[in-house]
């Protein structure tokens, strides 16, 4: 099974945002893709991961179906001319490569912001989609639980999850410390504005309103995240209602000025978080009593400090991944000999029962119980050495030879057929 594991990956490393957006999958479309794969191909252990930075498909198959799966994914997304998109994908056709890649993705080593704290939850959601469709076998179950345990070690033993290492996440971390249950207005839905909104989604207590010059963008994101929408010509009214204004609009001159704040007399205390370059909030707004401004430079400084700590933790994270991969590899190799062990147990148990039937007809219940206990103990001790030898042979890569020897010695194939 290990050698059958494969994957395809479209990510920020090879594909621009415009391409990634075309191939992004929500829960419904991800499950639809998985069902199509099950119908069209002989595959198991299917996992579909889709975030704002990547769309990936993992699967187990004796055949290399990477090219076919890429075409199916593109066609499902309404793209008929598939050839131009092929180079945006990474393809992993060997089990070791696909397993290593999933470990590194799931721990955040391949995230656009290294150590991304959202990626473990995104992998768990993908796993839940697979479980919902009964498309995970023992291999994928064990792999993902090994990854989750490795992630727990990363969080507990390293600084890899500490602090907000992206501008948008650092902005969220900042505003969460400003006041409880704030009314937040997000102005501008470019890439950084969307990131802020997605990081805000699901956080308790905040009341979020989004506003964009192109209303359709706001409507689409608002529907996705459950946020309130406002028209751009209502911006002064929304500023008056908000406690915190997060802005990332593109403008040559400051849009939020001292004059605007003066017009909005009777305002409550306001915080501006300006993520725009050039700045969209004039520094003079802080001359208005009760108005405070945080610029992108201050937020970037927080993010850079956190990123530096995370990068220093990368070697330790890789050590944890290497240990987890080794443990999983050992388990996977043992899976190869598991059927032989079960057949050997079955063959010996059949012999034990047959002999008991022949020689215990005149025994009392208490005598029969003792004989059962003795013969079962003997069988377990006889089994112990071959099982240990099989597992050791797995680690040496010599399992097949020992499997053949045991099959010949105990005639396991014939015993299985007779059973």
Image (cartoon, grey):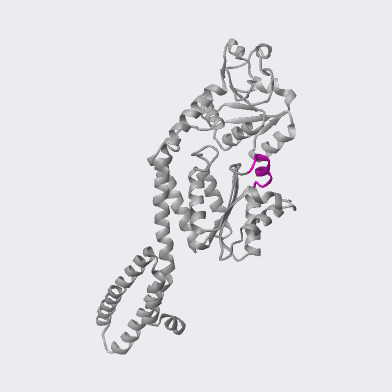
Q: Left or right: 296 with respect to 40?
A: left
Q: Which residues are magenta?
A: 15-24
Q: Is residue 419 visible?
A: no
Q: Is residue 228 magenta?
A: no
Q: Quadrant of the C terminus?
A: bottom left
Q: Is residue 21 magenta?
A: yes
Residue 410 coordinates in the image, percent (x, y):
37, 81
Viewer-proximal residue, 243 or 97? 97
Q: Is residue 264 visible?
A: yes
Residue 143 coordinates in the image, percent (x, y):
47, 56
Q: Is residue 171 above or below residue 283?
A: below
Q: Left or right: 185 with respect to 405?
A: right
Which residue is painted at 63% across and 60% down in the image? Answer: 37
Q: Is residue 287 above or below residue 33?
A: above
Q: Left or right: 217 with respect to 372?
A: right
Which residue is painted at 68% across and 19% down in the image? Answer: 255
Q: Is residue 201 above or below residue 400?
A: above
- Examine the image and state in which quarter residue 198 appears: top right
Residue 204 coordinates in the image, percent (x, y):
54, 34
Q: Is residue 190 above or below residue 29?
A: above
Q: Left or right: 234 with respect to 415?
A: right
- Examine the image and state in which quarter residue 92 appears: bottom right
Q: Chief secondary structure of the magenta span?
A: helix
Q: How many marks?
A: 0
Residue 52 coordinates in the image, percent (x, y):
61, 42
């Amino acid at each position: 099974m290990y050698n059958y594991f494969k994957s395809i990956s479209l990510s920020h490393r090879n594909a621009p945002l415009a391409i990634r957006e075309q191939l992004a999958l929500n829960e419904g479309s991800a499950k639809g893709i998985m069902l199509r794969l099950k119908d069209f191909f002989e595959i198991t252990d299917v996992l579909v991961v889709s975030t704002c930075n990547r769309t990936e498909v993992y699967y187990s198959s004796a055949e290399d179906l990477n090219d076919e799966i890429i075409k199916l994914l593109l066609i499902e997304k309404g793209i008929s001319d598939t050839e131009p998109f092929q180079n945006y994908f990474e393809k992993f056709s060997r089990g070791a490569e696909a397993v290593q890649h999933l470990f590194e993705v799931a721990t955040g080593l391949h995230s656009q912001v290294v150590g991304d704290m959202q990626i473990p939850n995104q992998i768990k959601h993908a796993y839940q989609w697979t479980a919902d469709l009964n498309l995970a076998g023992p291999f994928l179950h064990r792999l993902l639980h090994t990854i989750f345990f490795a992630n727990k070690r990363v969080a507990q033993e390293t600084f890899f999850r500490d602090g907000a290492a992206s501008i948008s996440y650092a902005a969220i971390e900042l505003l969460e410390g400003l006041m409880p249950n704030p009314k937040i207005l997000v102005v501008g839905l470019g890439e950084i504005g969307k990131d802020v909104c997605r990081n805000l989604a699901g956080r308790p207590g905040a009341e979020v309103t989004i506003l964009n010059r192109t209303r359709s963008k706001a409507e689409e994101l608002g529907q996705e995240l459950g946020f309130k929408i406002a028209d751009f010509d209502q911006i002064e009214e929304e500023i008056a209602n908000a406690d915190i204004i997060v802005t990332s609009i593109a403008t040559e001159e400051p849009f939020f000025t001292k004059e605007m704040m003066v017009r909005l007399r009777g305002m409550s205390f306001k915080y501006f978080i300006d993520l725009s370059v050039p700045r969209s909030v004039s520094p003079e707004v802080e001359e208005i009593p009760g108005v405070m401004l945080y610029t992108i430079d201050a937020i970037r400084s927080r993010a850079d400090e956190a990123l530096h700590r995370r990068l220093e933790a990368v070697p330790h994270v890789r050590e944890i991944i290497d240990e987890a991969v080794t443990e999983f590899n050992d388990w996977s190799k043992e899976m190869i000999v598991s059927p032989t062990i079960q057949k050997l147990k079955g063959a010996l148990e059949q012999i034990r029962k047959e002999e008991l039937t022949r020689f215990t007809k005149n025994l009392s219940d208490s005598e029969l119980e003792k004989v059962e206990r003795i013969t079962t103990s003997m069988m377990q001790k006889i089994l112990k050495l071959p099982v240990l030898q099989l597992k050791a042979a797995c680690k040496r890569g010599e399992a097949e030879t020992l499997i053949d020897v045991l099959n010949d010695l105990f005639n396991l194939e014939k015993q299985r057929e007779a059973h």
